[in-house]
Image: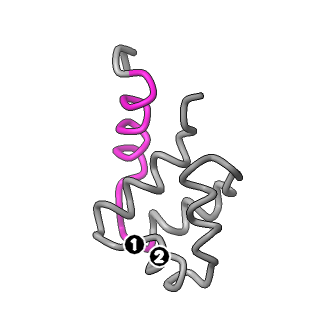
Amino acid sequence: MAKSYEAIMLRSIRKQVGITQKEMANLFGLGVNQIYNWETDQTQMRAATLIMIVEYYNLDFTVLLNEARDEISPTSAR
């Protein structure tokens, strides 16, 4: 099963800023299991939470979305 856009984007954000799941969880007042579950698609995160994290790091949501799209379907045209 393919990962969701949210899972791919969250992991990408974490890797870009160079933090662990535990560090991200602590920063946003979440449990490390919650971050893990989101990244592995065991639970789905709310869009508002993803937007909050993107804005916190001042990242470009469109770029992250396009990267996730490319990972899910590398041959799809934009």
Considering depth in this image, is 34 or 70 the residue closer to the camera?
A: 34
Residue 41 x %, y %:
63, 46
Which of pointers 2 and 1 indicates the residue nearer the eye? 1
Q: Quadrant of the N terminus?
A: top right
Residue 20, numbered circle: 1
Disc 1 marks which amino acid? Thr
Q: Confirm whether the magenta stretch covers residue 23.
A: no
Disc 2, disc 1: CB below 8 Å?
A: yes
Residue 54 lies, with reference to residue 40, above or below; the image says below
Question: How many marks do you count on the picture?
Answer: 2
Q: Residue at x 47, y 76 (%)?
A: 24
Q: Residue at x 38, y 32 (%)?
A: 71
Crowdedness near tag 1: few (<14), some (14–19) or many (≥20) residues, C-alpha within 10 Å: some
Q: Which residue is mark 2?
A: 24
- In the rendered structure, the answer to whether residue 22 lies left or right of residue 12 reads right
Residue 68 lies, with reference to residue 13, above or below; the image says above
Q: Residue at x 58, y 74 (%)?
A: 32
Residue 44 lies, with reference to residue 31, above or below; the image says above
Residue 26 lies, with reference to residue 68, above or below; the image says below
| SS label for mark 1 | loop
Q: Residue at x 63, y 58 (%)?
A: 37
What stretch of residues is rendered in magenta?
Answer: 56-73
Residue 30 x %, y %:
62, 78
Q: How far separated are the C-alphas under marks 2 and 1?
A: 6 Å
| SS label for mark 2 | helix
Give residue 73's quadrant in the image. Answer: top left
Q: Quadrant of the C terminus?
A: top left
